[in-house]
Protein backbone atom coordinates (compact mmCIF):
# COMPACT_ATOMS: atom_id res chain seq x y z
CA UNK A 1 0.00 0.00 0.00
CA UNK A 2 1.24 3.48 -0.83
CA UNK A 3 0.93 6.49 1.42
CA UNK A 4 0.42 10.00 0.07
CA UNK A 5 0.92 13.29 1.86
CA UNK A 6 -0.89 16.34 0.49
CA UNK A 7 -1.06 19.98 1.44
CA UNK A 8 -4.71 21.02 1.21
CA UNK A 9 -5.82 24.66 1.57
CA UNK A 10 -7.87 25.19 4.72
CA UNK A 11 -10.84 26.32 2.66
CA UNK A 12 -10.88 23.01 0.71
CA UNK A 13 -9.98 20.60 3.51
CA UNK A 14 -13.47 19.44 4.49
CA UNK A 15 -14.44 18.99 0.83
CA UNK A 16 -11.31 16.91 0.23
CA UNK A 17 -11.96 14.62 3.21
CA UNK A 18 -15.55 14.01 2.09
CA UNK A 19 -14.35 13.28 -1.44
CA UNK A 20 -11.79 10.72 -0.22
CA UNK A 21 -14.38 9.02 1.96
CA UNK A 22 -16.95 8.93 -0.87
CA UNK A 23 -14.43 7.36 -3.24
CA UNK A 24 -14.35 4.36 -0.92
CA UNK A 25 -10.71 4.28 0.07
CA UNK A 26 -9.94 1.75 2.79
CA UNK A 27 -8.63 4.32 5.20
CA UNK A 28 -9.05 8.07 5.15
CA UNK A 29 -7.71 9.63 8.31
CA UNK A 30 -8.07 13.20 9.38
CA UNK A 31 -4.88 14.40 10.98
CA UNK A 32 -5.16 16.86 13.80
CA UNK A 33 -2.56 19.33 12.62
CA UNK A 34 -1.76 22.33 14.76
CA UNK A 35 -2.43 25.56 12.85
CA UNK A 36 0.58 27.77 12.20
CA UNK A 37 -1.10 30.63 14.10
CA UNK A 38 -1.15 28.51 17.25
CA UNK A 39 2.47 27.48 16.77
CA UNK A 40 3.44 31.14 16.44
CA UNK A 41 1.68 31.98 19.73
CA UNK A 42 3.52 29.17 21.53
CA UNK A 43 6.88 30.23 20.05
CA UNK A 44 6.26 33.82 21.13
CA UNK A 45 5.33 32.79 24.67
CA UNK A 46 8.34 30.49 24.88
CA UNK A 47 10.65 33.30 23.80
CA UNK A 48 9.11 35.69 26.35
CA UNK A 49 9.60 33.08 29.08
CA UNK A 50 13.25 32.58 28.15
CA UNK A 51 13.80 36.35 28.20
CA UNK A 52 12.01 36.76 31.53
CA UNK A 53 11.84 33.50 33.53
CA UNK A 54 10.36 35.36 36.51
CA UNK A 55 7.04 35.60 34.64
CA UNK A 56 6.54 31.84 35.08
CA UNK A 57 4.73 30.30 38.04
CA UNK A 58 5.98 27.29 39.95
CA UNK A 59 3.60 24.35 39.61
CA UNK A 60 4.07 23.27 43.24
CA UNK A 61 2.83 26.69 44.35
CA UNK A 62 -0.22 26.92 42.06
CA UNK A 63 -1.48 23.37 41.68
CA UNK A 64 -3.80 23.60 44.67
CA UNK A 65 -5.62 26.51 43.03
CA UNK A 66 -6.84 24.32 40.17
CA UNK A 67 -10.22 22.62 40.32
CA UNK A 68 -11.41 19.84 38.10
CA UNK A 69 -15.19 19.99 38.01
Image (cartoon, grey):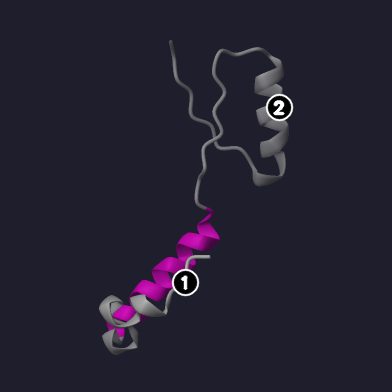
**Kind of element beneath mark 2:** helix
Q: Residue at x 66, y 29 (%)?
A: 17
Residue 19 at what x, y percent from top left? 71, 23
Q: Range of the magenta residues?
A: 35-51
Residue 9 at what x, y percent from top left? 64, 42
Residue 66 at what x, y percent from top left? 43, 74
In this rendering, the answer to whether 37 lies above or below 24 is below
Quadrant containing the N terminus is top left
Residue 2 at what x, y percent from top left? 44, 14
In this rendering, the answer to whether 27 lies above or below 46 is above
Query: Farthest residue in the front direction?
Result: 69
**Kind of element beneath mark 1:** loop
**Residue 28 lies in what quarter of the image?**
top right
Tags 2 and 1 touching, CB below 8 Å: no
45 or 60, nearer to the observer: 60
The CA span between labels 2 and 1 is 40 Å
Q: Residue at x 54, y 18 (%)?
A: 27
**Residue 10 lies in what quarter of the image?**
top right
Q: Residue at x 53, y 32 (%)?
A: 6
Tell me the chief SS of the magenta region.
Answer: helix
Circle nearer the N terminus (2, 1): 2
**Residue 11 lies in what quarter of the image?**
top right
Residue at the spot of label 1: 67
Instruction: Tell me: 46 left or right of 9.
Output: left
Report the number of numbered marks.
2
Mark number, residue 18:
2
Amino acid sequence: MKQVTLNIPDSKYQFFIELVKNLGFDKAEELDIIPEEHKAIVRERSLKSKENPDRLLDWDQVQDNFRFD
